[in-house]
Amino acid sequence: MSTAEIDGIRADGNQADGIRADAHDVFDAAHQINPYPRYRQLRQGPGPTPVRLGDAEVTLMSRFADCAAVLQSQAWGHGNVDRLSPFWDQQASLPGSFIRMDPPDHRRLRTLVNKAFSARMVADLTPMITSLVDTLVDRALAAGGLDVIGDLSAPLAQAMVGQRLLGVPAADAEMLRSWELAIARGTDPDALLSAEDAARRDSAGANVVAYLRDLVARRRADPQDDLLSRLVAVEESGEVLTAAEVLGICVLLLVAGMETSINLVGNAILALLAHPDQLALLRERPELAPSAVEEILRYDTPTQFTMRVALTDTTLGEHRFRRGDGAIVLMGSAGRDTDVFDGGERLDITRYAEPGRSPRHLGFSLGLHYCLGAPLARLEATTAIRTLVERAPALTLATDELSYQPSLIHRGLRSLPVDLSPAAR
């Protein structure tokens, strides 16, 4: 992305007027920098839009109401047990993860995991997060600049999720990050992957499962003060998590948890730099940081879409779906739906500032699969964004070219260099 293109999305998310593309074009990597004009075109169409992905015909859900209805409906799920899904069945290479399970297994695992992933545990991490962010920003201020991804959001997520929660040694962080990125790319629909992408995903999956299996065995033998030890020990009514299920949860935390946190901070800082009025407002009113995080989850969400399968014959408005039909729920599009969000194409960090107002967006999904790690991701992002903006009054973009990670589901920059010195640019 060039600075000119950032200027082009500053006002309303558009790079150019008059763009015409078919529905499948939303997945074209050439448009990954700014998919929002194409989302808008979909929303202006007749509603749920069928497209062909490889050998399967699936339906794109682009409007907030349709996306929310699918995410909350028990008629929709993942369908892996009955092999209904036209999408990748991650059980083949990443066994045990409940992110792609349906009830009753999903409910059983989530109930057990919630006991380990408690609100108190997240709150207890606040001093550690604050201290680490201060250290990282101190280092950046001394250097006069930083890469928001490589020097702030990724080290923060690795320290909290990888090291503090799972007990991964700091020396292994970069190795796990490379596996995590390969798996993240591989969570896109198979029809959108090259053979090399799929092979890297499967290889990374095998490597991370083997690594975590050894780590789990060590925690069983010698429990530590971390979430992984709690997962190993969790019990309810005599029922325990199996080794495969513990592995699956760890993979979920490494991929979905870390990528969401890393990309949320990067997307937020880029959006603020592209909207100087909002950056100035946040600097003037740092108490708006939590609202700003919610607004980024709506405006440029780190998770752009998810997949669902009709578990039974069902309807959505006037549209009928047969058991086994696939749907792609475009949360990135839903967040810009102007039928729901006044000025939905505009960044407004005060949108969620009203006390007691529940955030209305799909940035952490909805329903059964609402993000388990949402409180931790919010805490990390709020602390990182507020601290950097408060302590770096000269914050400016330090490059004319930006690029995104190849994953289409996980929207995040490869890097985000910024200057912090007043005389830098």
Image (spheres, rainbow, N blue to C red):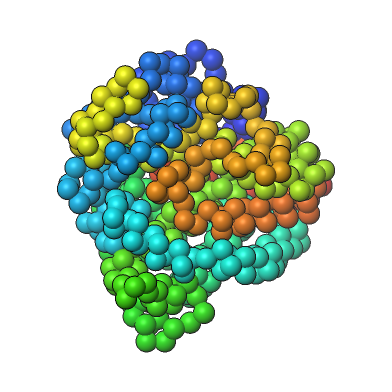
Residue at point 30%, 39% (across, down): 76
Is residue 95 in view? yes
Q: Nearer the viewer, residue 76 or 283?
A: 76
Residue farthest bottom in this picture: 221
**Viewer-proximal residue among 294 and 87:** 294
Residues 261 and 318: in front is: 318
- At horizontal 35% and vertical 53% (from top left) the residue drawn is 99
Name the quadrant containing residue 410: top left
The residue at 62%/65% (across/down) is 123
Quadrant in the picture for the N terminus: top right
Q: How many marks?
A: 0
Outermost front residue: 237
Q: Is residue 101 above or below residue 232?
A: above
Horizontal and vertical percent position of residue 28: 38, 30
Q: Quadrant of residue 254?
A: bottom left
The correct choice, above or below, for 242 with respect to 70 in the image is: below
Q: Position of residue 350 (x, y in %)?
A: 71, 37
In the orientation shown, which residue stands out farthest toward the top? 18
Q: Which x, y percent locates residue 304?
A: 45, 39
Q: Quadrant of residue 142?
A: bottom right
Rendered position, 37 above or below 300 = above
Q: Quadrant of the C terminus?
A: top right
Report the side of 104 relative to 231 (left or right).
left
Q: Does residue 405 appear in the picture of this structure?
A: no
Q: Is residue 141 left or right of residue 94?
A: right
For the point 54% across and 22% down, the residue is 339
Q: Position of residue 248 (x, y in %)?
A: 33, 63
Of 230 and 316, nearer the camera is 316
| 288, above or below 333, in the image | below
